[in-house]
Image (cartoon, rainbow, N blue to C red):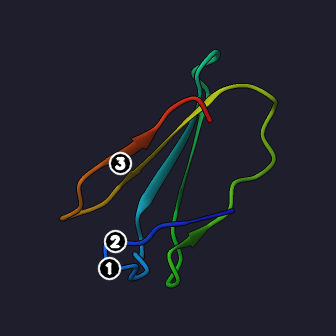
């Protein structure tokens, strides 16, 4: 489970979240709810990249998760 907010800590709705396994390239996509929250189904062990992007927003990416 995660949460997406802006710099003022306001919840961001309908942000596209992409979770990609760095070794296999397999990815899952989902969107945040009205509270900025998202939940990813259980993942296999490994290193992942998580990317958040939305209309009018700067894309944010974290690697090595």
Which residue is depicted at the point 48% across and 53% down?
17
Residue 65 location (% of width, % of height): 62, 36
Q: Is mark 3 on a helix, strand or loop?
A: strand
Label 3 neighbour load within 10 Å: few <14, some 14-19, many 20+: few
Along the viewing direction, whichever of 7 and 4 lies nearer the viewer: 7
The residue pinned by badge 3 equals 60
Left or right of 53 in this view: 47: right
Residue 11 vs 59, above or below: the answer is: below
Which residue is depicted at the point 53% across and 77% down?
33
Residue 41 vs 8, above or below: the answer is: above
State the mark number for residue 8. 1
Q: Do the residues labelled 3 and 1 touch (CB within 8 Å)?
A: no
Residue farthest toward the front in the current orientation of the protein: 8
Indicate the quadrant containing the N terminus: top left, top right, bottom left or bottom right: bottom right
Residue 57 location (% of width, % of height): 23, 61
Residue 58 vs 46, above or below: the answer is: below
Using the rendered view, name the quadrant where residue 53 is placed: bottom left
Left or right of 17 in this view: 46: right
Residue 3 location (% of width, % of height): 55, 68
The residue pinned by badge 2 equals 6
Label 2 neighbour load within 10 Å: few <14, some 14-19, many 20+: few
Q: Do the residues labelled 2 and 1 touch (CB within 8 Å)?
A: yes
Q: What element carries label 2?
A: loop
- Say which label, 3 or 1, has the lower sequence index: 1
Which residue is depicted at the point 50% across and 75% down?
36
- Say which label, 3 or 2, has the lower sequence index: 2
Q: Are marks 3 and 2 in contact (CB under 8 Å)?
A: no
Along the viewing direction, whichever of 64 and 12 lies nearer the viewer: 64
Q: What's the distance in space between the residues labelled 3 and 2, CA to CA?
A: 11 Å
Q: What's the distance in space between the residues labelled 3 and 1, CA to CA?
A: 16 Å
Along the viewing direction, whichever of 51 and 25 lies nearer the viewer: 51
């Amino acid at each position: 489970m995660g949460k997406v907010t802006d710099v003022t800590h306001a919840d961001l709705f309908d942000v596209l979240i992409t979770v990609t396994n760095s070794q296999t390239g397999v990815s899952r996509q989902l969107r945040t709810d009205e509270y900025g929250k998202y939940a990813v189904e259980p993942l296999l062990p490994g290193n992942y990249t998580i990317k958040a992007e939305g209309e009018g927003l700067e894309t944010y990416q974290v690697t090595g998760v």
